Amino acid sequence: MKKLLSYILCGFITANMFAADDQQMRKLLMVQRIIENFYVDSIDSEKMTEEGIRAMLHTLDPHSTYSDREETKELTTPLNGNFSGVGIQFNMLNDTLYIIQTIPGGPSEKVGIVAGDRIIAAGDSIISGVKRKTNSVMNILRGPKGSEIDLKILRKDTPEPITFRVKRDDIPVYSVDASFMINDSTGFIRLTRFSESTAKEMKKAILDLKAEGMKNLILDLEGNGGGYLNAAVDVASMFLNKHDNIVSTKSLYRGKDSRMDASGSTIMPDGRLVITVDQFSASAAEILAGAIQDHDRGVIVGRRTFGKGLVQQPFPLPDGSMVRLTVSRYYTPSGRLIQKPYTNGESENYDMDLYNRIKNGELSSADSIHFDESLKTYTLRNHRAVYGGGGIMPDSFVAIDTTSYSPYYRDLVAKGIPNKYAITYVDEHRKELKKNYTSEKKFIEEFAVSDKMLSDFVALGEQDGVTFSETGFEKSKNLMATVVKGLIARDIFNNGSYYHVANSLNPIYREALEIISTSQTYRNLLHEPQNQ
């Protein structure tokens, strides 16, 4: 690591690229060597080098970053589409690892591990009774493809632990978190990230829903922080015509500008399309929403998006670490800049943007959002006014809903009570639930969270130090019941079942459903010509 900067010079940064800056690079190396040879105390050269890189990047924009080897691995795994592991979804409860689901066809399911099992040991590592962070457990369970690990399992109604030898394999990381029909003609897809597998997953989800009769689609991008640009372009191509522009990038350096158009792989060229977004939708999610809006292909519903329109190019370093350097900016088809304002080297105000939005009332009222008229552009088909300079403003604004939220419920969530209660309840009633609710549809229609369940929920909170508040309970009672039902549905069916239940709490979803169900409202928002 002492020679990391030398490696940089000899590796991906060539002499030709930085010929004009050789003097500055020599100066940097000289200071490093002076410190190493003459400083009064011993130093950690690796730490000094990494801090120096971080400091250099800090003088640039807020999204140019450095990540060490472990950070780089964590950053890239969700986007690469898979990792090697044992194939389970789990939760930690009271220092015990509960298996929520096994991945269908995955290593654990193949050897007979089932939902509800508890892993008390993995290889030489004790899991149960030891305080471990989730990342620590994941590192134990993951490993090279083909490697084996013995999992000691405690199963309900089985007196002795069972040991399963599991051969690790590639485990998919899914982008589509939920996909189902809301009614006879409207489908719902929730997309959580843009990864290598996103286009394949989206195509399958759309075609499967169309086979069930889908004519209109709500695509949920709320909380989607982005990912790979190509994945966003591939998804946009599913809704746009061939050669429709999706995004352009502009750079200071000659030859770095680019334009990406729809490929012609349209699978849903018509039908009503509503995309939901919020203040956490960013980057690739904004590219998709901006392209759909600029081509008047669909209606955007929710709150103004994050505003990340800077393109980072990864530069891997010899030790597995990485620099992600901003090399260009994103522009929507109408020419809007997605990126919100920033000042190089001043990240504090940038990091406070969300807080400032809340403080200024932007999440509660569209009237609090002010646009620079000089950044106005128009959509390409219906010539609706849209604005650049910071995120995508939805066609239909939805204020954040705090009517059911209370400090009491906040404290319950902070202690993880909803998850703890759902895990415990399913663990005690799994056979009964599976017998009585043979389908997700039957569960959603018939299962209700009883007063006894809510009393037990409150009691669990009190055991964990959350003081009961009658006012808070009454205010958040429906919220608690709905979340608990959604978590139970997730545990006995699949992850998408949670959204099938909990979407009723989301005002953005409710508005999207109202718009997509009413042809005239949808057409009015797009400024479509009136029916003759």
Image (cartoon, rainbow, N blue to C red):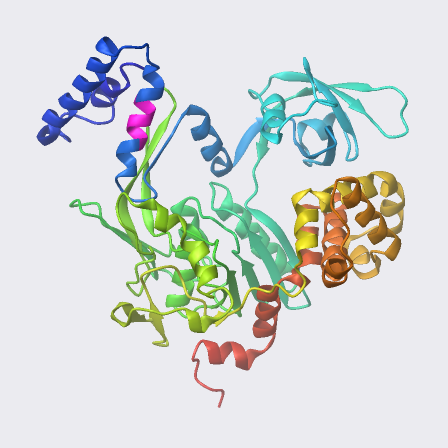
Query: Image point 83% across, 27% down: which residue?
Result: 155
Whether residue 265 is visible here, answered yes or no, is no
Lateral position of residue 464 relative to residue 340, left or right: right
Which of these two is toward me, 321 or 468? Answer: 468
**Looking at the picture, how far across and down is residue 13, in whole percent?**
21, 27
Lateral position of residue 122 relative to residue 272, left or right: right
Q: Is residue 290 above or below residue 61?
A: below
Which of these two is toward me, 262 or 21? Answer: 21
**Looking at the picture, how far across and down is residue 500, in whole percent?**
69, 57
Which of these two is toward me, 267 or 525? Answer: 525
Question: What is the tally of numbered marks visible in this picture?
Answer: 0
Query: Image point 13% across, 27% down: which residue?
Result: 24
Whether residue 294 is visible here, answered yes or no, is yes
Query: Image point 89% across, 50% down: which residue?
Result: 436
**Looking at the picture, how far across and down is residue 114, in whole percent?**
78, 32
Spot the residue most to the bottom. Answer: 532
Q: Is residue 50 magenta?
A: yes
Q: Is residue 141 magenta?
A: no
Quarter the N terminus occupies:
top left
Lateral position of residue 42 relative to residue 497, left or right: left
**Looking at the picture, how far across and down is residue 497, in whole percent?**
70, 52
Q: Is residue 299 above or below residue 248?
A: below
**What is the magenta range?**
49-54
Lateral position of residue 289 relative to residue 154, left or right: left
Q: Main secondary structure of the magenta part?
A: helix
Query: Image point 49% across, 48% down: which residue?
Result: 199
